[in-house]
Amino acid sequence: MNRNTPRWTGLVALMLIGMSLLTGCNTIQGAGEDMERAGEEVQDAAE
């Protein structure tokens, strides 16, 4: 086994975690925007 293998494994794991967190934030933000638009449409229909 190469001495650098644990270092690369840790680096790859950190990169994957970071990418998943960034993707999750975008997904949650998009869902919030969709819910906001739906709420505005309900308010417009009620008026």
Image (cartoon, rainbow, N blue to C red):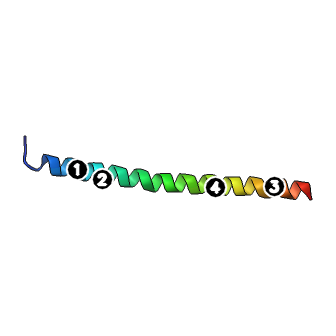
Cα distance in 3D space between marks 3 and 4: 14 Å
Real-space Cα separation, disc 4 to disc 2, in angstroms:
27 Å
Q: Position of residue 18 (x, y in %)?
A: 37, 55
Q: What's the CA distance linking mark 3 and mark 1?
A: 47 Å
In the figure, is residue 8 to the left or right of 1?
A: right
Give the crowd class for mark 3: few <14, some 14-19, many >=20 residues within 10 Å. few
Identify the disc placed on residue 14: 2
Furthest toward the right, the residue is: 47
Tell me the quadrant of the picture where the C terminus can be found.
Answer: bottom right
Q: Which residue is mark 4?
A: 32
Q: At x 44% / y 56%, what residue is drawn?
A: 22
Instruction: Give above or below for 2 relative to 22.
Output: above
Q: Earlier in the sequence, mark 1 or mark 4?
A: 1
Are the residues tagged 3 and 2 within 8 Å (C-beta)?
A: no
Q: Is residue 10 left or right of residue 39?
A: left
Q: Secondary structure at mark 3?
A: helix
Query: Residue under circle 1?
Result: 10
**Amino acid bearing label 2:** Leu
- Residue drawn at point x = 71 percent, y = 57 percent: 36
Q: Viewer-nearest of labels 3 and 1?
A: 1
Q: Residues within 10 Å of mark 2 (few under 14, many from 20)?
A: few
How busy is the neighbourhood of tag 4: few (under 14 within 10 Å), some, or many (20 plus)?
A: few
Q: Quarter holding the N terminus?
A: top left
Q: Residues within 10 Å of mark 1 (few under 14, many from 20)?
A: few
Precedes in sequence: disc 4 or disc 2: 2
Q: Hey, what amino acid is under mark 3? A: Glu
- Asked which quadrant contains residue 41, the reply is bottom right
Can you identify the residue that label 3 sits on?
41
The picture quadrant where one finds residue 29 is bottom right
